[in-house]
Amino acid sequence: MLQLYFVAGTPDCPGGDLARVLAEAIRGGITAYQFREKGPGALHGRARFELAAQLRELCASAGVPFIVNDDVELALALSADGVHVGQTDAPAAEVRRRIGAMLLGVSAHDAGEARRAAADGADYLGVGPMYPTATKLDARTVQGPGVLSRLRESGLMLPIVGIGGITAARAAAVTGAGADGIAVVSAISRAADPFRAAQQFSTPGSLAYRD
Ligand SMILES: Cc1ncc(COP(=O)(O)OP(=O)(O)O)c(N)n1
Ligand SMILES: Cc1nc(C(=O)O)sc1CCOP(=O)(O)O
Ligand SMILES: [Mg+2]
């Protein structure tokens, strides 16, 4: 399910039409979706909840896991498939206790954070930024795919997705360095044709496809 992990909120989509973009991305072959409604222009309150509920349904009817960024309450209210938290969000061990068997994704940037996330009950790690990104304004210094090789060399077995600035042309470098999949925002959300953009990553024989 981590092979092609689409992450997006309304500010990431031209015209704010996230439901259309997600429907097209699903048709193009994404394997998981993360609702990340934050940043300038993000929805709040009732509008945010209603959009999340709509997208949750869209994912459920397509069999695509629906994961909520940061917000454990929202994930529980929508019976989401999972939650993703970073190093400055609610502590992973506490989130694990609250969500039970739901999927837990944790951001990690080095072997120490990765080991702690594993001990806290993470199901997968998000590691980035692989490349420069304009999507996350508070992203850390670019690490490059080399960090993935170092994590694997340290013995880390947990599934990993690389994130940050990943395009179809760069995906193979990320999976080749040890990631089980890639997480992308703008390469799909800002594409003129999100269906074709997702397909480029997901089609056997295409530049970015990984078996
Ligand atoms: C798959 C994935 N990996 C990393 C992140 C980043 O999480 P975080 O560091 O908590 O930053 P925000 O996304 O909350 O701004 C992610 N969301 N997804
Ligand atoms: C949500 C997120 N987390 C990152 C990290 O490094 O942890 S980079 C990022 C944004 C990725 O967007 P794009 O694919 O448009 O570069
Ligand atoms: Mg976070």
Image (cartoon, rainbow, N blue to C red):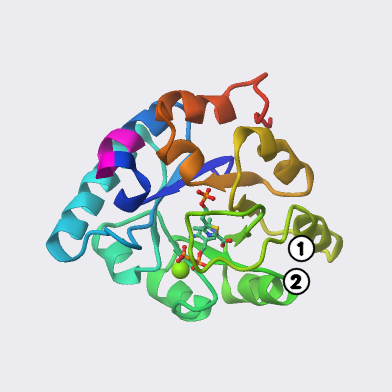
Q: Is residue 160 above or below residue 176?
A: below
Image location (x, y in percent) of residue 2: 56, 45
Mark 1 close to ligand 1, CB under 8 Å: no
Q: Mark 1 or 2, which is nearer the eye?
A: 2
Q: Answer few, some or many: residues within 10 Å of disc 1's Cα (few below 14, many 20 plus, some between 14 and 19).
A: some
Q: Three-letter amino acid code at disc 2?
A: Ala
Q: Which residues are magenta?
A: 15-22
State yes or no: residue 20 in magenta: yes
Residue found at x 32% / y 52%: 11
Quarter assignment of residue 191: top left
Asked whether 27 or 139 is in front, the reply is 139
Q: Is residue 43 above or below residue 167?
A: below
Quarter assignment of residue 95: bottom left
Residue found at x 76% / y 49%: 178
Determine the residue located farthest toward the left in the rendered image. Answer: 46
Determine the residue located farthest toward the right in the rendered image. Answer: 153
- Residue 77 got which mark? none
> Tag 2's secondary structure?
helix
Residue 146 left/right relative to 132: right
Residue 60 left/right relative to 184: left
- Residue 111 got which mark? 2
Say which residue label 1 marks: 156
Image location (x, y in percent) of residue 12: 37, 48
Quarter assignment of residue 99: bottom left
Q: How many marks?
A: 2
Q: Is residue 162 above or below residue 26?
A: below
Q: Is residue 177 above or below residue 22?
A: below
Image location (x, y in percent) of residue 46: 13, 62
Marks 1 & 2, CB-CB < 8 Å contact = yes
N-term-proximal mark, 1 vs 2: 2
Q: Three-letter amino acid code at disc 1?
A: Leu
> Tag 1's secondary structure?
loop
